[in-house]
Image (tube, coloured by chain):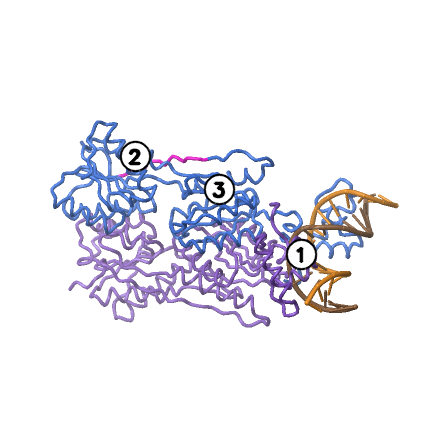
Chain colours: A blue, B purple, C brown, D orange
Amino acid sequence: MKKGFTTIKDIARELKVSPSTVSRALKNHPDISEDTKRAVNELAEKLNYQPNAVALSLKRQRSNTIGVIIPEIVHYFFSSVISGIEDVAYEASFNVIICQSNEMADREKANIKTLLANQVDGILVSVSKATKDFSHLEKIKNSEVPLVFYDRIIPGFKADQVIIDDFDASYRATKHLIDIGKKRIAHFAGPKNLLIGQHRKQGYQKALEDAGLPVEEELVFDADSFEKARLAVLKVLESGIAIDGLFAVNDLTAIGAMQTLQKKGIKIPQEVAVVGFSDGRFSGITDPTLTSVDQHGYEMGTVATQLLLKRIHSKEDYPCETKVLNANLIIRGSSVFSP
Amino acid sequence: MKKGFTTIKDIARELKVSPSTVSRALKNHPDISEDTKRAVNELAEKLNYQPNAVALSLKRQRSNTIGVIIPEIVHYFFSSVISGIEDVAYEASFNVIICQSNEMADREKANIKTLLANQVDGILVSVSKATKDFSHLEKIKNSEVPLVFYDRIIPGFKADQVIIDDFDASYRATKHLIDIGKKRIAHFAGPKNLLIGQHRKQGYQKALEDAGLPVEEELVFDADSFEKARLAVLKVLESGIAIDGLFAVNDLTAIGAMQTLQKKGIKIPQEVAVVGFSDGRFSGITDPTLTSVDQHGYEMGTVATQLLLKRIHSKEDYPCETKVLNANLIIRGSSVFSP
DNA sequence: GTGAAAGCGCTAACAG
DNA sequence: CTGTTAGCGCTTTCAC
């Protein structure tokens, strides 16, 4: 393509030496005389020589590139994961090819095909919600290209993985509400069929249990969006269920709930304290600011990439690793102590 | 790398034909007999043959890959741009290599080097805030790799570009406030040295002018963040400047202002109507919801990529194009008509 | 200390 | 209809 890209041959021709000599000189091979080295490096500099990474990949049978499959890049959590991936990859001189599945199984499949065709040295995957059939992922395993799952894993699939301890995070979020003196804490829960929703609910219930508080199903509501939260709050208020705390499965839900509570004249955190689960960067701009679990997307990206690079660089096989990240509870205005 | 990747040679050997025959059969070349084609395709299928994209790139001198340099992926605007890029690239069977500059000039430079070394067929750039020296970008131009700027351009640099009409958007935002009956509209402005800030302020002023309203410098405040907005509002209130409308240079600023106004008992939009400029997805979750300019990041990504692909596929040179996208004003609760 | 040659996987011009 | 050959840019044995 682009004419004007200097190759090793160009340098060799000009200097009347062989391409192999140039190649060696450029990598400072001990066999080459100082004179030749100097001449080669000077000319390379002058002609702005750049090694052709594609030729190198073909030769070396490795591309110094890792592939990433991400459900949807526009979510703050995922973009921060990418940011972490990118940073670690950059440090290790690896490129990153990003593919979005847009939550479609077909697209995920096509992405994997592309990545494999491009000889990526490893693949990071967060599976799409629509993926039911895992044969394309099995195919990666068979191709001996290292594979690491992040966030959305496939239970039982043998591969390295990085996940968040949803149970623990929810436990701590709920415990925090208990610690500041709340006794009837509602939970706005996610879909029952998603692992993530189950774990968060279980953490909530365990915290109540451990504190000797009753675990009541009537305090758990099916609400995992801004709008559903509004409705759920209205339902709570109408039915006369008295609550003094709320742990929501995500931030948007928490924010929807806060707004509706406030509209009804309920003071936050004095009357009802609220804790969310971070999937955005909303927590700092609400009024009051929202206590929330920080999912550490960036860290997840770095850890997953480190796992992958380790696998790529290792000669022999070793057992799969699972890293469980602890999510931090960031305490903000919506749940400060208020006796 | 990965053993077990089937190559054309493997198929050829097994079928006792030459690699070229296999190559031709696979691309349905008319010269090849139906029998051979069938045999080849069947075996290819069976062995799960995938063409090696790296070898193809080397051969063809084009990689079917475009490089993207993005300041920071975690911003909603930028991640939505990527989403647009990705979608168009995917349709055209192009891969996308993403590099973050993290607003650092060095990193941007290194990224470009990597992209060129990887023989990308074109590059999309939004320049980092720190970039003062443009030699690395000039280098792209010299290398004959097509280059398209999106959002952050370099004035005077000859290349295709896609930008948003900040002036027009601000004009319409301000005009909207005037249309709903506001007469003393403040502007919370961005840094004076950034083009973007200048244009937004100019659009604001022109709208006032055209409506026959006085253009007062005392109504323009240096405030482009959540926190600065708080302080600016307090200043406004203390100084007794009466305002009934506010156009902020971005959403976070608008939200900070709204909250402070509300805390002081001022009703939005009845007493003061507020309009932001979207750089996030906050507008739907504030109370009231925030009227804001939608920057159409996704569209910017698609348009920029189309421009780039056109340039990549075109044989002859043609004059640089500049696409100016109109940003929509999305009217929400913070500025509904209230006589 | 340097060069020639082979080869990574694929294609295409040229032969037959 | 199919095979041979050369070559994309680079590295790396093997010779000298």
Q: Chain of mark 2?
A: A
Crowd around label 2: few <14 · some 14–19 · many ≥20 (10 Å):
many
Q: Residue at x 32, y 51 (%)?
A: B252
Q: Nearer the viewer, residue B305 or B202?
A: B305
Res. B15 mark = 1
Q: Nearer the viewer, residue A256 or A28?
A: A256
Specify which label sits upstream in the sequence, 3 or 2: 3
Q: Provide residue A225's location: percent of width, then percent of height.
A: 27, 49
Of discs 1 and 2, which sits in the foreground? 1
Q: Is B237 left or right of B153, judged from the image as shown?
A: left
The quadrant of the rendering that contains the N terminus of chain A is: bottom right
Under circle 3, the secondary element is strand
Q: Provide residue A224's location: percent of width, then percent of height.
A: 27, 47
| Highlighted range, magenta | A322-332
Q: Which residue is mark 3?
A: A148
Q: Amino acid at mark 1?
A: Leu
Q: Nearer the viewer, residue B330 or B139?
A: B330
Q: Amino acid at mark 3?
A: Val
The rendered magenta stretch, by its main secondary structure, is classed as: strand
Q: Provide residue B332's location: percent of width, then percent of height.
A: 25, 60
Q: Residue at x 65, y 67 (%)?
A: B33
Crowd around label 1: few <14 · some 14–19 · many ≥20 (10 Å):
some
Asked if the stretch drawn in magenta spans residue A272, the answer is no
Q: Which residue is mark 2?
A: A203
